[in-house]
Image (tube, rainbow, N blue to C red):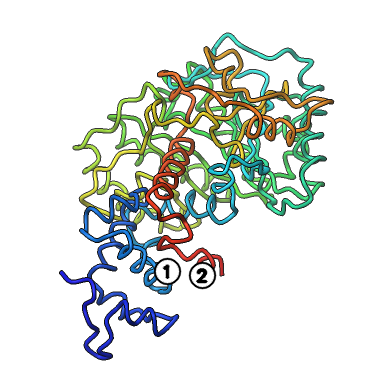
Amino acid sequence: MMLNNQNKKTGYSFLDKLEHDDSVDNEFVSENPICWKIIKLLSNNPFITQEEISIRIEITKQELIKNNRIISKSEWAQNYIINQGAGSKYWKNTILPSIQNGKAQAVLDEKYEYPDRIGLCPGLSCMFFCSFCGRNYSAAYERKFGEEGLEMFKQIIDQTPKTINNKKVYHITGGLEPLTFPRIGELISYADQNGFEMEIQTNGFNLTSDFVNKQSGIKDLSILRVSLYGVDDESTSKITNNKKAYSTVKRNLIDFLKLKLDIKIGLNYVILQNQIKDLYKLLDFIEEINIESDNQIDFLTLREDFSHEADNISGTEREELSIILDKIQNRIKDKNLNRLNIDYGYALESIRKNRGSLEKLKRVTHKELRPKIFPQISIMIDPKGDVYAYHEAAFLDRAGSDRYSIGKVDNQNSLEMVIKNFVEKSEGIKPLENDIAYLDSFDHVITILLNKLDEDAKFGIPISEGPINLNQILN
């Protein structure tokens, strides 16, 4: 196949067209067989390197750069790559935001940037003992960190750089269960009063009507996200080792929805191996809550179990899953579910968009971990002020996780100082084999992305020479 195939209408070769015209029409790109191959590869596999593309379609680096330029000029091509393939969730949820805001480049350059994804982990304890949780079940923070932690989190909010215009930079999560933080309402209100839209991820057990009345700052949330650990009493008790978990959380959700606050309310649910048919019961659960509350859950986030010890959903189950997901999409058209938006995440979305895909969640090995990690993109902070570089490291007294505390925020050290010292002055952290247990799915994906960008730059095709037109996408 020749690179310079001519367009039948113009007589120009595709690469000649590029030299004569800064705009490229959709038909021009779609008729170019080389461009089309590149577009398809990137649409389904956002992490394929430029060198891999050149090898697979048998063109030189210079030819690839020229075709990248054509693709970058086509609005149609940009839309297809980002929205039409099995990799769309990777593109939209993680890759583009991290590249567009300059944070990925800061990581590659080992330069300081304030992260735009900061998890505040105020929880002092937890009443669940979930089978897949990485926490140390016997660990709990001293009560004094309820008071000290609030002041430390306020300090971080007060010292947010004025250049940060991301209202969603902070969110409240675990570590341990956030609603065990005795000043949780004050923390939410303080952030809200300072212009930040706050989201909390909780197991919902403490979210009783009395608790909400006492911690009235809960009503200042933008998003309430409740993690479910089962679809009935039996499954929930088995996972959480708490016999009251199912009934309590269900009652709390109903009562909270009855308040009809201006808060987006959603559920997180992890699909475990051999339990994919529980998704039908999950919709029953949501429908019952909606009917009794005379309101509706706004969103459902479905994820595959990503814990280090998890067994992957089998190939046979993955084939069945695509059928189940179709049925779910049809069912949420019902009047008691018609406000429900379902986020399928990275791998499940690829199953929905590509019927033949049995792709599993992308992971790295410890050999692929980056010593300087990526605190310019995301971090977690516990009530003692310890700043963790990976999401699953932020558990009190988890074996080995203290290695990934990159510093401590206190009266003498701001968050900016902690990150800057680690990025610009430290040697980083040498990865060990078991360290991948500290990464969640986001950490894996960001690591893969950064490694890909490094490889592309070494090959001689950095972001600026790639096929994605960031200016066009931003506009």
Residue at 69% x, 35% y is: 420
411 relative to 14, above or below: above
Q: Which mark is residue 325?
A: none
Residue 455 visible in this rendered orientation of the protein: yes
Q: Circle 2 sits on which residue?
A: 472
**Secondary structure of the residue carrying numbered label 1:** helix
Q: 316 or 447: which is nearer to us?
A: 447
Comes first in the chain, label 1 or label 2:
1
Residue holding disc 1: 72
Quadrant into which the N terminus falls: bottom left
SS of the residue under disc 2: helix
Query: Residue 405 location in percent, x, y?
Result: 62, 22
Residue 161 coordinates in the image, percent (x, y):
77, 46
- Compared with 469, 16 (above or below) is below
> Residue 218 versus residue 458: which sits nearer the camera?
458
Cα separation between marks 1 and 2? 8 Å
Residue occupying the point 39% across, 85% down:
20
Residue for point 40% across, 31% down:
368
Locate residue 74, reporting x and y percent: 40, 74
The residue mark sitting in front, 1 or 2, is: 1
The one of 299 and 361 positioned closer to us in this rendering: 361
Label 2: how many Cα within 10 Å (few below 14, some 14–19, many 20+): few
Which is nearer the eye, 51 or 123? 51
**Are discs 1 and 2 less than 8 Å apart at CB?**
yes
Quick check: 87 left or right of 145?
A: left
Which corner quadrant of the image does residue 306 belong to? top left
The residue type indicated by label 2 comes to Gln
Q: Residue furthest left?
A: 1
Query: Dot 1, crowdedness within 10 Å: few (<14), some or many (≥20)?
Result: many
